[in-house]
Image (tube, helix red, strand yellow):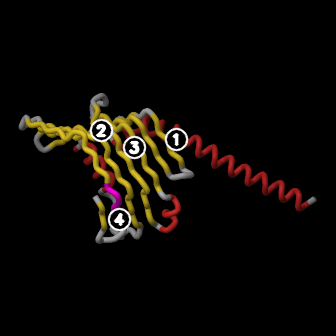
Amino acid sequence: TKKKSMRKGLLLIVISLVSLILVVALAISPITKSVLENHSKEYFGRKVSMNDLSLNILSGRLKVSDFTIYEADDTTPFVTLNLFDVNVNLKKLLTKTCEIESILFSNLTINVTQNGEKFNFTDILNMLSDTTASATDTTPSNWGIILNDVELSHSNIHYQDKRVGSEWNLEDISIIIPGIDLSYIQANMGL
């Protein structure tokens, strides 16, 4: 009877752990989406919106659809993206390697505006430099970074210099990069 009660207790613990993992796996996407949309101004200095965010912590896949980063005025789009889809090889993290199996940027549009020395993203760079200026650790990382199947599909870059009055557009850009290995000082890249 003592063995039966130990087995029941162990079974109950295993079922509880599996249930907890499933609840976290199911709840993480809407929670992450809500946190990003509601606190993006605090974290990045810009308002962010998206239609859907799907994060699967068991497979290492993140999909974001209809993503927008707004200008400082919170209404004009700075960066828009129809679909961002990334797959991470979670097993490789155990060997100190961040291997991205695939990354897709579909219908990415970036609007860059310059007025003299200032760009429409200067405030973001200033915010990031303020938070990273206190980092004093210069120890090189022993993590490897490998990016496979990087795809930029049907994307656009719009640039406008307000002071000079010039403007140019790169439209319908599509690039596929089979692999980039940033694990070593001399990296290999296929384009």
For residue 159, above or below residue 17:
above
Q: Secondary structure at mark 2?
A: strand
Residue 173 tag number:
none
In primary-sequence order, the first of circles 2 and 4 is: 2
Residue with the mark numbered 1: 29
Question: Residue 56 appears at what percent x and percent y?
Answer: 53, 47
| Few, some or many residues within 10 Å of mark 4 (<14, 14–19, 20+) | some
- Classify residue 9 as left or right of residue 55: right
Q: Nearer the viewer, residue 187 or 8?
A: 187
What amino acid is found at the position of numbered circle 3 in the picture?
A: Phe
Residue with the mark numbered 2: 79
What amino acid is found at the position of numbered circle 1 in the picture?
A: Ser
Between label 3 and label 1, give the one nearer the viewer. Answer: 3
> Whole-Å distance between the Cαs marked 1 and 4?
29 Å
Residue with the mark numbered 4: 181
> Whole-Å distance between the Cαs marked 2 and 1?
22 Å
Q: Secondary structure at mark 1?
A: helix
Quadrant including the C terminus? bottom left
Which residues make up the magenta segment? 177-182
